[in-house]
């Protein structure tokens, strides 16, 4: 067990951040969590919740007092707008005596991640997860209502990762020696097709799920109808139609860094089975 440390987690109410918080707590560390709205944060007991906004770096100065670790996201506000405030945030972190920083890679170069990589006084680690298992929640409505998933490119492979494993890698890198200057690609234990994922979700909900393969044109029409912007649609066509090798190749980062095997999608599905329950069962539950 490493010595108890105090870490400031930004993005703490998010899909990944909640697991960074949980994994730090599970390892016996103290957590201060940043949010723009403490009343809505719903973080576990024992977490010190503080208000602040990453687009207004002066609000981080009190939040950074007394912490040795800092977990950062690269965006702020609606639409995942890249933060331009990295230099100011790092200046405050240095002044506060922060020793280790993790940054959650935002899918491409961002000013904040560049600022972290240029940092020479504080140890830093870039966390580069592939597709989150939580993306399967996008299917929850269709599965609960109609028992089906409607997707294009159903044979595409994804080495998708459980968000808790991103949190676990972050927690170790924030509190232990040996991770400075590393870029950690973080994946799950298997590369899965859409069919593999649908099969695991069917086991978890205890009922079959129909997989309907869409043509590219049908998928674009469906995404437009659901309100996605043309930029997002182009991004989806690119990553689903032509998943880069890094997104479909399993690596052993989770086991190497945390000493435990990466969590499976079957486990994720079991943990989230309620979200995929038939609408009639969910209504009577
Ligand atoms: N989805 C994937 O498959 C995938 C894969 C790899 C990488 N990524 C990357 O992961 C990141 C998304 O992570 P996520 O899904 O965990 O995020 P998320 O669930 O959308 O959470 C957003 C978090 O950001 C915080 N936030 C937003 N603007 C803020 C601001 N101005 N000041 C302070 N906090 C702010 C929110 O805090 P409050 O609302 O509480 O203030 C919230 O905790 C993106 O960079 C994405 O590119 C995603």
Image (cartoon, rainbow, N blue to C red):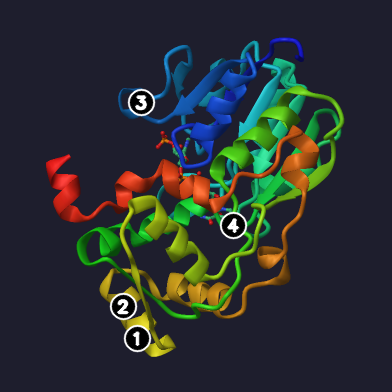
In this view, the residue in front, 148 or 13, is: 148
Q: Where in the figure is residue 73, as x and y percent of width and height?
A: 58, 41
**Image spot of residue 209 (x, y percent):** 33, 67
Q: Which residue is mark 3?
A: 42
In the rendered view, would you say 194 is above or below 270?
below
Residue 130 shown left or right of residue 219 in the figure: right
Question: Looking at the image, is mark 2 or mark 4 nearer the viewer?
Answer: 4
Pick the quarter of the image with the N terminus: top right
Viewed as shown, does residue 228 lie left or right of 47?
left
Residue 222 circle label = 2
Q: Nearer the viewer, mark 3 or mark 4?
A: 4
Residue occupying the point 33% across, 54% down: 206
Q: Is residue 9 visible?
A: no
Query: Which SS class for mark 2?
Result: helix
Q: Are marks 2 and 3 in contact (CB under 8 Å)?
A: no
Q: Is mark 4 within 8 Å of ligand 1?
A: yes
- SS for dot 4: loop
Q: Which mark is residue 218?
A: 1
Mark 2 or mark 3, earlier in chain: 3
- Circle nearer the N terminus (3, 1): 3
Tell me residue 3's x, y (percent): 75, 10
Picture quadrant where residue 170 is located:
top right
Q: What residue is shown with label 4?
A: 160
SS for callout 1:
helix
Residue at point 72%, 70% (across, down)? 245
């Amino acid at each position: 067990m490493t010595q108890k440390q105090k870490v400031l987690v930004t993005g703490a109410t998010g899909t990944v951040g909640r697991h960074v918080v949980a994994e730090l707590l599970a390892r016996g560390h103290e957590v201060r969590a940043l949010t723009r709205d403490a009343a809505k944060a719903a973080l576990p007991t024992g977490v010190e919740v503080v208000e602040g906004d990453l687009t207004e770096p002066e609000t981080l100065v009190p939040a950074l007092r007394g912490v040795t670790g800092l977990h950062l996201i690269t965006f702020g506000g609606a639409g995942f707008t890249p933060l331009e405030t990295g230099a100011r945030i790092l200046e405050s972190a240095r002044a506060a005596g922060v020793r280790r920083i993790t940054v959650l890679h935002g899918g491409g170069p961002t000013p904040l991640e560049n600022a972290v990589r240029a940092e020479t006084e504080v140890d830093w680690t870039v966390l580069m997860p592939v597709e989150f298992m939580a993306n399967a929640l996008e299917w929850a409505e269709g599965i609960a209502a109609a028992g089906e998933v409607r997707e294009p490119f159903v044979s595409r492979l994804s080495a998708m990762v459980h968000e808790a494993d991103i949190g676990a890698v972050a927690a170790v890198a924030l509190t232990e020696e040996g991770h400075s200057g590393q870029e950690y690609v973080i994946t799950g234990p298997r590369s899965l097709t859409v069919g593999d994922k649908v099969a695991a979700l069917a086991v978890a909900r205890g009922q079959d799920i129909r997989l309907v393969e869409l043509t590219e044109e049908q998928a674009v029409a469906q995404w437009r109808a659901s309100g996605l912007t043309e930029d997002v649609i182009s991004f989806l066509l690119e990553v689903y139609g032509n998943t880069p090798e890094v997104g479909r190749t399993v690596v052993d980062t989770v086991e190497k860094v945390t000493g435990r095997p990466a969590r499976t999608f079957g486990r994720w599905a079991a943990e989230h089975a309620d979200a995929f329950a038939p609408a009639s069962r969910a209504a009577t539950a």
